[in-house]
Image: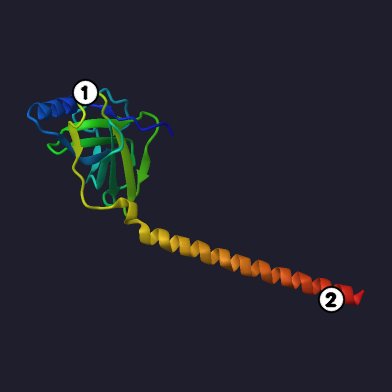
Amino acid sequence: MKALVPVLTRAGMRAVFNASRDGLSARVSHLAFGDSAYTPSGEETALKSEKLRIPIAGGSWVGDFTIHMTGLLDAGPSFWIRECGMILSDGTLLAVWSDPATPLAYKTDGVPIVTAFDLTLEALPQGAVTVQAGNVDLSLFFGVEFSRLATAITDNFNRHMAQAAELAELKRQVASLNYRLS
């Protein structure tokens, strides 16, 4: 899959510059997901077919102009995710991603998806945008599940090794019997 490169919207850039002019930072607070596929122009003010909006769970600057954001899609309907948007705290669409041919993922009702996006903001003044994140640490969200999976894999490996040792012993006994019979 090619890189997910969101397009900054004109409305989003205006909101950022207005906040900067007032000595404030625009805050990215939500991620929105929809099922419409198109090539973003930057003129968008909303997703074409928004299905789900979630608060940002975590966010941090990972470079001079790049913000890393995470979110958890753990509710809502099933649909092909074909568009995503980064939403400012005032509801303005800051950036949008969509691809006319390739969906991002399939969102299944009842199956959580952890999402992560990097948004590069070279066109905006440094520090003009911040992330309004919740208090969910998604790096640990699946800790229990990963621990159970690791335990199951280790147990399976140990059973396999025990069976391999048992098989080797049986082969040795058969070879010993064959030697005595000949």
| Extreme residue toward the front, this view | 64
Tag 2: Cα neighbours inside 10 Å, few (<14), some, or many (≥20)? few
Q: Position of residue 125 (x, y in %)?
A: 20, 26
Query: Which residue is drawn at the image coordinates 24% and 23% (left, top)?
Result: 123
Query: Which residue is drawn at the image coordinates 28% and 52% (left, top)?
Result: 137
* Residue occupied by mark 2: 177
Q: Position of residue 22 (x, y in %)?
A: 7, 29
Q: Quadrant of residue 105?
A: top left
* Amino acid identity at mark 2: Leu
SS for dot 2: helix
Query: Which residue is drawn at the image coordinates 89% and 77% (left, top)?
Result: 180
Asked whether residue 89 appears in the rendered view, the answer is yes
Q: Which mark is residue 43?
A: 1
Between marks 1 and 2 in the image, the one whose residue lies nearer the viewer:
2
38 lies left or right of 88: right
SS for dot 1: loop
Tag 1: Cα neighbours inside 10 Å, few (<14), some, or many (≥20)? few
Q: Position of residue 45 (x, y in %)?
A: 18, 29
| Extreme residue toward the right, this view | 182
39 lies left or right of 182: left
Query: Which residue is drawn at the image coordinates 36% and 58% (left, top)?
Result: 143
Asked whether residue 79 appears in the rendered view, the answer is no
Numbered-mark total: 2
Q: Quadrant of residue 116?
A: top left
Tell me: residue 101, above or below residue 55. above
- Colouring style: rainbow
Q: CA distance from mark 1 to mark 2?
A: 82 Å
